[in-house]
Amino acid sequence: MVNIRKANKRDLKEYLKLKEKSLDEYSKLIEEKIKFVKRYIIKEFNNAISKKNEVLLLIEENNKPKGYLLGVLAITPYYKDAYMGDLFIYRNDRKKGYATALIKKFIDICSKKSIKKYRLGVNIKNKDALRLYKKLGFKIIRYEMEKKKWKN
């Protein structure tokens, strides 16, 4: 049975495992090592479970973690939107609908707060994620560029 729920304090150990795997896979994708700094991940986790404008959803099947979605709600007098900052599903559990289910749950939570605009960032190399987001109706609205070193 698949269950999606907001994370709580008891989920820290599992979140650390998920996040470490997520950073490891992302490092391979971008061909640059991202260091796992436990104290930062713990702070991220604590913020996500305690702040009203952050949401950390976990997805499990038969009480086994499959992935997570970390999002932020931006509600100001001028606009209301939500940003999905991090989405991860264990590699062996992909293409089973878990990511779609997490996104739909996040949107459901946001719609109850009258949020109607959803944003996310995705690495251009992450073709599977791009396909998923396009399938769910997300559109590219801007390009972001970076330069690591300046050469004369």
Image (tube, rainbow, N blue to C red):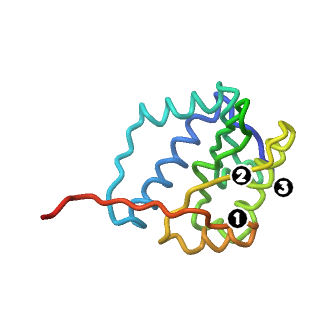
Tag 2 residue: 118
Quadrant of the drawing holding the N terminus: bottom right
Q: Amino acid at mark 3?
A: Met
Tag 3 residue: 1
What residue is drawn where x is 69% and y is 71%?
134
Cα distance between the residues tagged 2 and 3: 28 Å
Query: Upstream in the sequence, badge 1 or badge 2?
Result: 2
Find numbered disc 1 in the image and state the secondary structure of the residue it sits on.
Answer: loop
What residue is drawn where x is 52% and y is 70%?
126
The image position of residue 41, as x and y in percent, is 47, 37
Please tell me which residue lies in front, 152 or 138: 152
Cα distance between the residues tagged 1 and 2: 8 Å
Query: Upstream in the sequence, badge 2 or badge 3?
Result: 3
Find numbered disc 3 in the image and state the secondary structure of the residue it sits on.
Answer: loop
The image position of residue 136, as x and y in percent, is 75, 67
Task: Mark 1 and mark 2 in contact? Answer it, CB < 8 Å.
Answer: yes
Q: Quadrant of residue 32?
A: bottom left
Q: Residues within 10 Å of mark 1 (few under 14, many from 20)?
A: some
What residue is drawn where x is 67% and y is 67%?
139
Using the image, tell me which numbered label, if any, was put on residue 114: none
Give left or right: position of 67 versus 124.
right
Please tell me which residue lies in front, 44 or 76: 76
Query: Upstream in the sequence, badge 1 or badge 3?
Result: 3
